[in-house]
Image: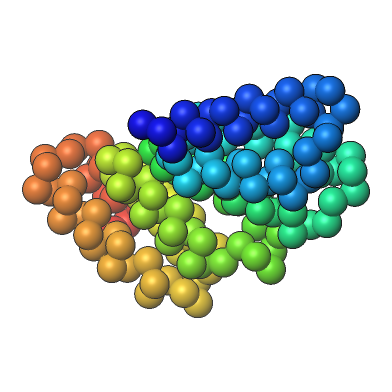
Amino acid sequence: PMPRFAAVLALVCLAALVGCGGEASLDQSIDALQTSFNAKDFEAVVAAAGPLLERVQAEGGDASKAFRVEKLRLSAIARQGQGDLATEHLERLAGAYGAQVNAKLYNQVGSYVEEAGNLLEAVSVYDAGSKRFPANADDFKPRIEQLKEKATAAGDPETIARLKSLGYL
């Protein structure tokens, strides 16, 4: 489809510009990353985020720009169904960007992992959010209940075992 092609083209152009002295502004580069995410080119987002974060730091970009790149990478990882890796990123970001990382973000990331079809690792995201934000534990209960129902209906023994080991079943 054309949007994916356009996103790949944007990233290729971005890489060329960065390689030739970085003519694309930092904001343009972050916008290109957002375009790739919107086009569902999650692999490209994950690949480009690391070098872009280094550039944000090298150019003295503010924390909001760095967090935007971090959040795009995190969301792309989650959209790929990599819940355990997403949880590691969430926990790291909670230390570095405490004000921006909240229960809502954990719920959002967990739902991305769940939508990608990885119920087992979605459990980990929701559980980590519930533990990091005990005052918001009730926000995670409906999600975990849905996972219980899905895992039971699908006869998913690994997810059921993880839910049991965490005390949800």
Measured as percent of width and height from the top left, residue 77 is found at: 49, 39
Which residue is drawn at the image coordinates 22% and 45% (left, top)? 160
Residue 138, above or below 63: below
Which residue is drawn at the image coordinates 28% and 68% (left, top)? 142
Residue 7, above or below 104: above
Residue 139, above or below 12: below
Measured as percent of width and height from the top left, residue 161 is found at: 25, 42
Measured as percent of width and height from the top left, residue 18 is found at: 79, 28
Left or right, 76 with respect to 117, comes to right
Quadrant containing the C terminus is: bottom left
Left or right, 109 with respect to 47, comes to left
Residue 124 visible from this viewpoint: yes
Measured as percent of width and height from the top left, residue 50 is found at: 69, 33
The image quadrant of residue 53 is: top right
Left or right, 105 with respect to 89, comes to left
Residue 70 visible from this viewpoint: no
Which residue is drawn at the image coordinates 13% and 48% (left, top)? 152
- Name the foreground residue: 1 vs 38: 1
What number of labels is visible? 0
Which residue is drawn at the image coordinates 55% and 44% (left, top)? 35
Left or right, 14 with respect to 57, comes to left
The colour scheme used here is rainbow
Quadrant containing the N terminus is: top left
The image quadrant of residue 39 is: top left
- Name the foreground residue: 154 vs 27: 27
